[in-house]
Image (cartoon, grey):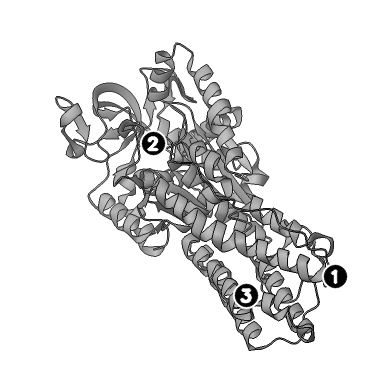
Amino acid sequence: MSYYVTTPIYYVNDAPHIGHGYTTVMGDIITRWHRQRGEDVWYLTGTDEHGQKVLRKAEQNGVSPQEWVDRLVEDEWKPVLAKLDIANDDFIRTTDPRHEAGAQAFWTDVHERGEVYKGSFSGWYSVGSEEFVAEDDVTDGEGDDEGHKVSALDGSRLEHMTEENYFFPLSAYRDRLLELYRERPDFIQPASARNEIISFVERGLRDLSISRSTFDWGIPLPWDPSHVMYVWIEALLNYVTAAGYGVDDEQFERLWPADVHIVGKDIARFHAVIWPAMLMAAGRPVPHRVFAHGWLLVGGQKMSKSKANGIRPDELVDVFGSDAYRYYFARALTFGADGSISWEDIRARYHAELANGFGNLASRVSGMIGKYFGGELPAAGALDAAEETFVATVAEATTAADGAMDQLAPQDALTQVWRIVDDLNGYLTEQAPWQVAKDDAQRERLATILATAAEGLRVLAVLLNPVMPKACASLWESLGAEPTLGALADQRIADAATWGQLAPGSTITKVPSLFPRIEEEKPE
């Protein structure tokens, strides 16, 4: 079995912002960590390209919907993955032939099981979130939305529609879903999202319209091509169509069920209510976990294009670099809760924690080995109490960080790893190798101090590689580790704290400035 992790497939009505980048980077860090354990990992992301909102956006731009989504995917979405150093194993598009084949196979299965019926729908629909909205969740708009009906669920503007559609009996799955939540309390995480979903389901569920018949931008229903699949019941299927459903049974058996669906909390209902009900109807196992992360807040408000606070990932990466971008969102925010971000905080953390903390540490150690030992790693002598304490800290922090990643808490994992950074900086300050170097009689002690520091950097290169792959690759090269230990990607988390792995005599080169100081001001 593989460790199979997914992001939502992102709706391509416009260019990506850092909210999309946040989800994708968190998934990437978690899956890279599992790869560093030596596990078989499969990381999926992709794009959701059907639905009325995409159709209207294409019409506004005077192109066909296929031309519109092709342009956005190639010019905007895929480049962001490269910009953020995302190591995804697959990229699914809902316009891919494999997705269409798998989606039609899935709904054919459900239809043949008698879980679909024909009816008419008359009610409210949010084009903005592509969601049917119950009367209880319809309210009068205010401000810019005055005179319109809006959704109490997310504030999106509503349109009244009447259509003949096919329906899925979602209401019949209320008790089975509540039983799932009771039997598997970790199915929905964090607890705040779980409690909200349970409350939503306990109120009762309405049957779900699974088709649209007033436009044709979508996947036709296999038993009635005059209808296309409702965008959500088609998009959710990407997790199984990418895994080979209806196309590659061997791959599907290897990958499914998914270990973690990482989603924003605003779409948790679709993933924790509609999606498991669909799978139950098809007789398929549900995923192990749905993890709903919080919103990014800018100036105290949820980030959105309409509020003009939607920052693009490349704006940050072009100034701070991809490693710092990845580090900031993993360290500064609690995954699963809302988190405030600001240019000023990113800049402050960059200089305090990366430039002055980690980067300067690597530079000092390689510089001193170059100065005092001609760039050749010395052999350590007997370890004193200071070294023994540091080695124990490394072991404790590594174990704790590994456990935090199992809990999908990268912020806690990095807090543990930074214990090593801080303790190693403190160790060097206390041992003062620049003072010890003045006494030739303490040559062995000097060697022990610097060999200890180099070993600490080796551990950090392994533990931080999932978070900051570029900086860690430079550090690994600086340590001269590959000739004897192999590639950084092949180093295992479980072995990272095993002491004394760097070979004495290895060539230590002056590490380039991993995080140079940034003078650039915040862009207007």
Q: Residue at x 70, y 71 (%)?
A: 455
Contact, mark 1 vs mark 2 (Cβ under 8 Å): no
> Residue 303: x percent and y percent?
35, 40
Three-letter amino acid code of the residue under disc 1: Gly
Q: Residue at x 40, y 29 (%)?
A: 230
Q: Residue at x 74, y 58 (%)?
A: 510
> Residue 521: x percent and y percent?
45, 41
Comparing 186 with 495, the one in front is: 495
- In the image, which is nearer the foreground, mark 1 or mark 2? 1
Contact, mark 3 vs mark 1 (Cβ under 8 Å): no
Three-letter amino acid code of the residue under disc 2: Gly
Mark 3 element type: helix
Identify the residue under disc 2.
310
Identify the residue under disc 3.
428
Tag on residue 151?
Answer: none
Q: Residues within 10 Å of mark 2 (few under 14, many from 20)?
A: some
Spatial separation of the CA atoms under disc 1 and disc 2 = 51 Å
